[in-house]
Structures are given as C-alpha cells and as structure tokens.
Image (cartoon, helix red, strand yellow):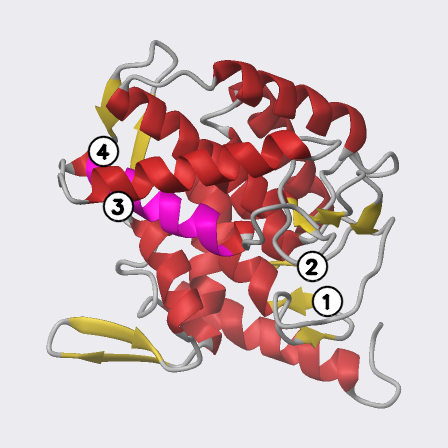
Amino acid sequence: MMLPARSHFLDSEIALMLASRRMVEEKAEYKPLLHDLVDAMTLRMEQGAVLSAESYPDECWTFDNAAALDAVRMSDQLDGGDHSDLIRRWVAMAKKKLVDPQSGLLISAYTVSGEATYGPEGSSLWMITHCLRLLDEDFARDQYQRARKALSRGMAGFAWATEWPASWRGMANIDSGPVIPGLEVSAGSSGMAFIGASSFGDDAYLRGLAATLDFSAFPTRKGGRLKYCASNQVGDAALALRRSAGTALDQSGRREIMSTEIKTTLGRDPWSGIFLSARFFLTRAAALLILFCGSAPGGVA
C-alpha cells in the first residue's frame, strides 16, 4: 500500500475542482488546499512503478491519474510550479503500458505494478480523452477518434455509446450504469460521451446524443429550467461540463478561459428547436418501429 494512505479518486477530483475554480477567478483560500493536494498526489504517483497512485488498494484508475495531472498542470500555471517532467513521463508510460493492444484504447484500471485489471470502458474513456488535452493534445485526439470509432452508435437521428469495444467485455457496474442488451446502450458511457464530443467539437455526435437524451431521459421544463428526471447528480455534472468548455491552458502556457457555450456548426445549441419538428417525430417513430420489430418474435435482427 502506498503511503500516506489516501484515495487518488477523491484527491484528484477535489484538486481539479479547486484548480479550475482558481483558473476562472482566483480565490486565495483555495491556494493552500490545492498546494497540499498537489504535493500529496505527486508524492504518491512517484512511488508507483508506473507513476500512478491508488484510488483503492492496489487499484489505479487512468481517469483519476489523468485528472490529477490536469490539476497539477493548472496548479503549475497558477503558482509557478513545474511538474512537466512527471507529466511527460506519465504520458510516455501510458502510451507504452496502458494501451489495450487490440483496440488501441487506454485501459480503465490497473495495479500499482501496471497489470491491467479493467480494459477500455466508455464511462472512463470519454473523460480521459478530455483530460489528456492538457497533457498531450495529439494523444488525446487519437484516443477520442479511436473511442468514437469503437464505442459510438447511432440510428434514425439518435446516438449513444457502448461501454466496451468489441475486443473486450466487462461486467455492468455502477460506472457503466444499465446496459441495454442488443443495442448495448450504456447510460454511463453515453453520458460521458457528451464531455468527449464537446471537448473535441464533434457536433454531429453531440446532436445525436442530445436527441437520445431528450427522448429517453424524461425531460421536464418548468420556469425556464430543464430537468432530466432519469438523471442523477453525476449525470447532471457531466451535462454541466458539456455545456461549458471549462478552463484550460493553451500550448503556450497562457491562461485561457474558453467559451462558456459550445455552439454547433449550424450556429445553435443541439438542444434548441429540433424537438418539435415533423422530422423529429417521424424519425423517432421509425426508430421505435425498428426497435419493436427487432424485439418481437420473428422480427428483424
């Protein structure tokens, strides 16, 4: 067990929130908290054979280590630190040891020694691709394109994401959410796909994901507010991150506050205006007919 005994899962996400808040607008009382977390995270990462800290005993998650390094890089920009060597070494290690040889996608979890315990999973991978943009833009884009090819699905205007590539099958769990047999729709992967699609400007995929969400997640609109009754706090947070590009550092190291609203190539948000059109109802009716026929005895495959 690494010392001190901590959870990289908790440390990384708290540090990322503190760093992001300070990037948007400085808050002095957050500086010592972030400093302590960065010190603790980097100390534990350097202890590991693969430069990764545990989220659980002998269980490291790519998601948590990528998020931790995002927080570290933002902290460096804010406070003048320099962990560029650790970031460079971790990215090189990830390319060499954490990539699934069959799919080319990053695995989700591994031991302190680097042995894979969970293969590629959409509920982790979409966020990993987003985090990687602050660490290695080319690697991030390569992983997103591979994930898009391996995990994204669509039909009749809908889009969704599967949890696993064809080369690896895991067990549905709290991260994946329910997985619908046949179509292999994963609630967790589909929700996190919003983050990846937004981060990489994949407007076509975003529109399809938004259509599926609005059709299936029981939206209610009241007093100018939109709520998805099938969602929860984690799902709401993922959608909130999708709706704003957040805070990032550009390649020159300058502080850059990205646009607060990502628009589609049509110049509008993918949620706006499409759900009352005749095309919307016709395509959704066709999709329901296909699903019904496919599930009925003797129906089409």
Query: Which callout, 3 or 4, points at the residue further toward the start of the chain?
Result: 4
Of marks 4 and 1, the one in the foreground? 4
Q: Which residue is mark 2?
A: 163
**Callout 2: helix, strand or loop?**
loop
Camera-side residue of 253 and 285: 253
Above or below residue 36? Residue 290 is below
Magenta-drawn stretch, dominant element (helix, strand or loop): helix
According to the picture, the residue beneath numbered tag 4 turns out to be: 23
Q: Give the residue type that dot 3 points to.
A: Arg
Residue at the front extreme of this rendering: 3
Query: Which residue is under mark 3?
Result: 268
Task: Kindly check if marks 4 and 1 are in contact, taking CB atoms under 8 A apart as contact.
Answer: no
Other-residue count near label 3 (Cα within 10 Å), few / some / many at <14 / 14–19 / ≥20: few
The amino acid marked with disc number 2 is Glu
- In space, the residues marked 3 and 4 are separated at their CA atoms by 27 Å
Which portion, as a residue range, is magenta? 10-23
Relative depth, front residue between 91 and 122: 91
Label annotation for residue 212? none
Q: Which residue is mark 1?
A: 184
Amino acid marked by disc 4: Met
